[in-house]
Image (tube, rainbow, N blue to C red):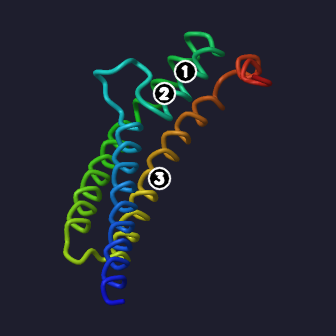
Amino acid sequence: MTGFKHGRRWLGFGLVLSLALNAFFIGAAATDMIRFDRDKDRHGHGAMRYEMNWLAARLPADAMAKVEAAVDGDRDNAQRHIQRLHALRADLGNLLAAEPPDRAAIDANLAAIRSELDAMLGQAQAATIDSLLTLPPETRKKLAGT
């Protein structure tokens, strides 16, 4: 019976460790997905690239240039979020390496990562929407129904 409890404890520890590692790598992928990197294609990465490509397919070049300028103007703010995300991921790695791992601290760190990602994406979306709202109505109508 003692061996069963011992094996069960290891199974539980393995499951928690597996979930924590998956969360770490998902957070890392999400951070990289949203990163603004001037060396890549002009529309960036991940979620923002999807949004910008969607807009580029519907807006004339001059309108798209205005949107891109607004997003580029927010690049310093995005870089601050990215630096914070790198620090949070480093903290998460330390929490995962601790013996024994502190699940509550890991969960709090993951919540902070999600919050930082939400803030970064929200600010980029706000800059995009603010610039779209300055476009003439006939230009914005091209976004309807698609």
Q: Which residue is drawn at 26% across and 65% down?
A: 96
Cα distance in 3D space between marks 3 and 1: 21 Å
Closer-to-camera residue (78/49): 49
Horizontally, residue 142 falls left or right of residue 131, namely right
Query: Who comes first in sequence, dot 3 or dot 1?
Result: 1
Q: Residue 89 carries which label?
A: none
Image location of residue 54, percent across then percent down: 60, 22
Q: Residue 49 carries which label?
A: 2
Q: Which residue is drawn at 38% across and 18% down?
A: 41
Closer to the observer: label 2 or label 3? 2
Query: Who comes first in sequence, dot 2 or dot 3?
Result: 2
Query: Furthest-front residue in view?
Result: 1
Mark 3 residue crowding within 10 angstroms, few (<14) / some (14–19) / many (20+): some
Horizontally, residue 113 falls left or right of residue 57, namely left
The residue carrying mark 3 is 119
The residue carrying mark 1 is 53
